[in-house]
Image (tube, coloured by chain):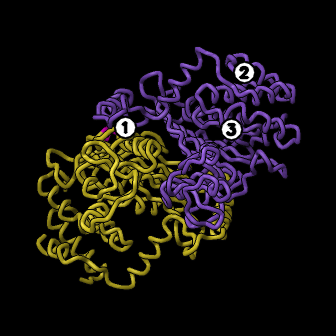
Chain colours: A yellow, B purple
Amino acid sequence: MKVSAAILKKKTIDIFKKYKLTSKQAKISADIIIKAELVGASSHGLSRLKMYINRIKRKLINNSPKIKIKKISKSISLIDADNAIGFVGGDIGIKQAIKNAKSTGIGIVAVKNSGHYGLSSFYAEQAVKKNMLVFCFTNAPPALAPHGSKKSLFGTNPICFGTPTGTKVPFILDTSVSLVNRGKIRLAAKLGKKIPKGSALNKYGKPTTSAIEALEGVQLPIAGFRGSGLAWMVDILSGVLTGGNHGGKVRDPFDDFTGPQNVGHLFIVFKSNLFLNNYTSRIKQNIRNVKKLPKVNGIKEILYPGQSKFRIYKKNMKKKINIPKKILRDLNDL
Amino acid sequence: MKVSAAILKKKTIDIFKKYKLTSKQAKISADIIIKAELVGASSHGLSRLKMYINRIKRKLINNSPKIKIKKISKSISLIDADNAIGFVGGDIGIKQAIKNAKSTGIGIVAVKNSGHYGLSSFYAEQAVKKNMLVFCFTNAPPALAPHGSKKSLFGTNPICFGTPTGTKVPFILDTSVSLVNRGKIRLAAKLGKKIPKGSALNKYGKPTTSAIEALEGVQLPIAGFRGSGLAWMVDILSGVLTGGNHGGKVRDPFDDFTGPQNVGHLFIVFKSNLFLNNYTSRIKQNIRNVKKLPKVNGIKEILYPGQSKFRIYKKNMKKKINIPKKILRDLNDL
């Protein structure tokens, strides 16, 4: 069914408020959830709302957190999110990192005792809009097997990097280190389609291109040891360094109710004119150089990371969003 | 032929000094070149020596650079390497970043007007030995086609991340964003072997698994738009931000003698106990969790990034290194 973003957001805010999130918390959370729908990332949108509410009901997400911000220096802060909903932990984290970078040129902020915070790109965007470059790292429950293992331990652990471009459309790379996401494998299994070589192992730890076997086995990171190393790096930066859970200990928000997730986030933000005063013209030149390259057949334009999502967002803002009936039913139930 | 590392290093230092590098510059450069041989990365070792000398002879590498270090804040420095040999630009850069991090917790240092600096891992190692976490970024001449293009523009642009592990063996991820390196494709072409799907395009911009066609065409980044985005990120961080060349303008050191390379580097270094005082026990736990996972058949131990190179290094330190005759002849000629 088609529903306008404004109505969906209002509904989502009301639901969160019903479960005793403050107006501010509810607004931050709903904003990011609906933005995910608007950029076409519905896997990070309303389909997760029921999960968040389930965890609030069980007090695994704290609806009245006492968030502590520890100032370590003008550049460095540690935030204990007290098991607030992840969106709130993430939002306070990036805002603090931006504040620190404004003051000293560079800000580095760790957040612990947080939760799943949706798409990293929305936090990166906040820094880019202030003309800053940004890294966002966050870990996630086990989904990928480390290289050489047949059991999952790393999360899909995205690497997110953003930079201003001198235009309204930010460059935001927000890439998981898995080749194919689980939703796509489920779909391939339904349709009887193969999945790419090297993307999964069967339950015996052997490489497979069968989607059904992959669902019983484990997913692999991109490019063997390279992707495995990148997933490991993200777990260290967002978990080991910050005080968050790590090493396979982040709980699955959907089905592990034995305690809060304690996801960690790390934000590194710095001014684009840290070293030079003509960053804007340089990045524009850089993007021009790439865009003017000869294209492979069927490609009209070389897009930079974030550009495609921005276009989908703009398009969806003008019309209603298509939401599956099941999700709308959940929304009404809540 | 088998030669000891000490003899090779002495010879390399003498050659650099003959071409008027100072003792210190010659020592730094030889040290990194021979280390590359010792870890088994001979593509970054003595096979490049003739190239460096060629560029010194043509004054494209400056053998008496006036390197300027501009202190922007206690955390932030910009280094103009004045077209010094890349090893020297890189070495001064990482040392300054470590110094800044010692003083404030975090150091960020950009280097411009530098050159190819060998393996990033040797710079990362310096920071890790001081119990710090580190990112090293550097760009390189065109080798990979951006996603959607049939022409190379990005370099193999490594992503390098290091962390102490509480042991003598550092965790150092130093991964290029190409699936297969050019040397391996050349070898596959000679042996008539296929290369992996998705690693190259032929000269018409069509995907190919023929090594011969790949050599006439272009190499692709790992994992399509993901790897392409990562290569682009590294070009922005090390080139656009620093004042180095970027957007396909870094010159190939082997065959482009129209000017200096102007490679850029970016080093971000921070203390491991920035947020917590038990980083060492946490990282040890993290690595233990991964290592104890069940393994796929044929794998005895899950290694973390850098562990394999460290073992090769230790082994090679005890014996002489195998150097191809052609390389030794070059050495004697120089």
Secondary structure state at the residue bearing disc 2: helix
The residue type indicated by label 2 comes to Lys
User: Which residue is label 1 attached to?
Assistant: A148
On the same chain, marks 1 and 3? The answer is no
- x and y percent of residue A35 in the render? 35, 70
In this view, the residue in front, B55 or B107, is B55
Q: Which residues are magenta?
A: A241-247
| Foreground tag (1 vs 2) | 1
Work out how far the residue at label 1 is from the one at label 3, CA to CA, in angstroms.
Answer: 31 Å
A218 lies left or right of B175? left
User: Helix, strand, or loop for circle 1?
Assistant: loop
Q: Main secondary structure of the magenta part?
A: loop
Dot 3 crowding, Cα within 10 Å, few <14, some 14–19, many 20+? many
Label count reads 3
Q: Is residue A27 placed above or below B260 in the rendered structure? A: below
Name the N-terminal-most of marks 2 and 3: 2
According to the picture, the residue beneath numbered tag 3 turns out to be B117
The front one of B14 and B72 is: B14
When the figure is inspected, residue B49 is found, relative to residue A33, above or below; the finding is above
In the displayed structure, A333 sits above or below A224; it is below
Q: Chain of mark 1?
A: A
Residue B315 seen in render: yes
Q: Which residue is mark 2?
A: B9
Give, as a three-letter code, the residue at label 1.
Gly
Toward which corner of the image does residue B282 lie, by quadrant? top left
Separation of residues labelled 1 and 2 (CA atoms): 36 Å
Q: Quadrant of the C terminus of chain A?
A: bottom left
Q: Which quadrant is the N terminus of chain A positioned in?
A: bottom left
Which type of secondary structure does the marked residue at label 3 adopt?
Answer: loop
Q: Position of residue A100 (x, y in %)?
A: 48, 50
